[in-house]
Amino acid sequence: MDNMKFTVYSGTDCDRCEEVTAWLKDNEISYVSFNIRTNERAKDFLVGKGYRSIPQVYLNGFHVTGYKDYKKNISEALNKGG
C-alpha cells in the first residue's frame, strides 16, 4: 500500500468530506487532502474534470469516488492494488 497515494478534495464545513476522511483514518489509509475553498488550484482541477461536488477521492491520479458508495469504491480500489 506504500505506492498508493489517495488524494481527497474537500472543503471547509463539509460534513460529507469529514465523514470520508474520518473513515480513511479509521481504516489506517493514508491520504492528502486539498481544501477547494482555500486552494484555487485544487478547485480549478476539480472544475476542469467536471466535478461540482465534494468530496472527490483520487488514487494515484485516477478518480475513485465521490461521496456516494465511497466505502465500497475505495475498498475495491485497494483490493485492485490501485
Image: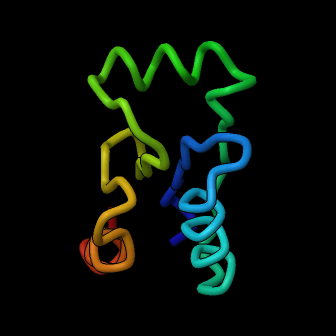
Task: Examine the rendered structure and indicate whether residue 67 appears above or below residue 76.
Answer: above
Query: In x, y percent, where is residue 8?
Result: 55, 49
Q: Which quadrant of the figure has residue 21?
A: bottom right
**Identity of the residue drawn at 54% across and 61% down:** 16
Looking at the image, which is closer to me, 54 or 49?
54
Residue farthest along the bottom direction in this orientation: 27
Q: Locate residue 31: give its quadrant.
A: bottom right
Task: Count the numbered circles shown.
Answer: 0
* Image location of residue 10, percent across then percent down: 59, 44
Tell me residue 39's x, y (percent): 70, 21
Residue under the point 65% across and 40% down: 11
Q: Nearer the viewer, residue 2 or 30?
A: 30
Q: Which residue is drawn at 54% across and 21% down?
A: 43
Query: Vertically, is 58 above or below 38?
Result: below
Q: In this view, does 76 lie to the left or right of 7?
A: left
In which quadrant of the rendered view does residue 22 lie? Answer: bottom right
Vertical comparison of 70 with 12: above or below = below
Q: How is the image coloured?
A: rainbow
Quadrant of the drawing holding the C terminus: bottom left
Viewer-closest of 66 and 60: 66
For the point 39% across and 19% down, which residue is it? 47
Horizontal placement of 35 versus 20: left or right? right
